[in-house]
Image: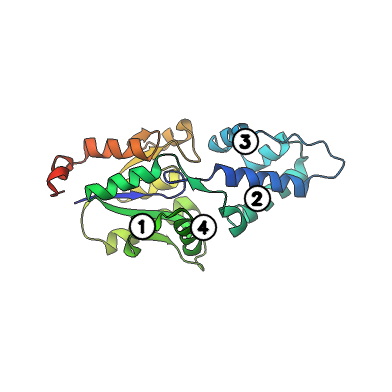
Amino acid sequence: MLRIITDFDGPIMDVSERYYQVYRFCLSQISRPDQIIQQLPKAEFWRLKRAQVPERQIGQMSGLDHMQASEFARLRRQTVHTRPYLKYDTPVAGATETLEQIQALGIDLLVMTMRRTSELEEAFSRCDLGRFFAPDRRYCLSEDYVKTTDVGDKPLLMQRAIAELSPAESWMVGDTEADIAAAKTHGLKVVSVLSGIRDRMQLSQHQPDWVAADLGEAVDIILQHANCSVYLNAGNC
């Protein structure tokens, strides 16, 4: 059996607009009425985010002073995953079609995300994505889970999945170092995608097995290199 475990934000959902709207909100809340602020264009803001430029630095580049920038970073962390802003997330171009392709091929498909259950269900319902993932193929955080770091928490989520699922040739698709860590900790091949919150340089530092433009290209890579790929058409994978 061939199994694809995919992160949600990045490979499937485009979160750039949510992050940009939160950036704008935080600037408006932290800046003084008489202060000259240089709001970054979305493309520049997202380039900085993908390059992992610190939040405080982004705040200062936008015209905030040192103390304001620290408060800006704190407010952003508090706000970015709140329900009012999740509505800005939309599927990555081509992601839905790729999920349909995976489903048609009979590949075992899992989603593994640092979203909490309610956050995942909101996107599933609003964007009609729940149809691709059976309830026992959804690995996310409970509402009361106390987060540490994604790099620390995601391998634990992978550990749980491996313990619960039947053996299979499993591949990970993700857009951050946490996905790479989760895969490598448990001996899975990992394809990193550039449709999410890390650029190629940041991803390459963590040595994924492949880097792809998006989920569609990642699936192509998996089908080319999976040990059982030649059996897909016969339904024996």
Examine the rendering and report whether any part of residue 235 can be seen: yes
Using the image as rendered, state which of residue 204 and residue 3 is in the foreground. 3
CA gap, disc 1 to disc 3?
32 Å
Percent across and percent down for residue 103 are 28, 50
Please name which of the two marks, 1 or 2, marks the residue nearer to the observer.
1
Q: Amino acid at mark 2?
A: Arg
> On the picture, is 222 further left or further right than 85?
left
Residue under circle 4?
148
Q: Amino acid at mark 3?
A: Lys
Using the image as rendered, state which of residue 219 and residue 112 is in the foreground. 219
Q: Amino acid at mark 4?
A: Thr
Percent across and percent down for residue 73 are 67, 47
Find residue 145 and name its label: none
Q: What residue is rendered at 47% in x and 40% in y? A: 196
Residue under circle 1?
131
Q: Circles 2 and 3: CB distance less than 8 Å?
A: no
Label 3 or label 4, whichever comes before in sequence order: 3
Tell me the element at label 3. Answer: helix
CA gap, disc 3 to disc 4?
29 Å
Name the outermost residue toward the right. Answer: 34
Q: Amino acid at mark 1?
A: Arg
Find residue 42 and name its label: 3
In this figure, which colouring scheme has been used for the structure? rainbow
Q: What residue is rendered at 32% in x and 47% in y? A: 100
Using the image as rendered, state which of residue 16 and residue 54 is in the foreground. 16
Label 1 or label 4, whichever comes before in sequence order: 1
Residue under circle 2?
76
Please name which of the two marks, 1 or 3, marks the residue nearer to the observer.
1
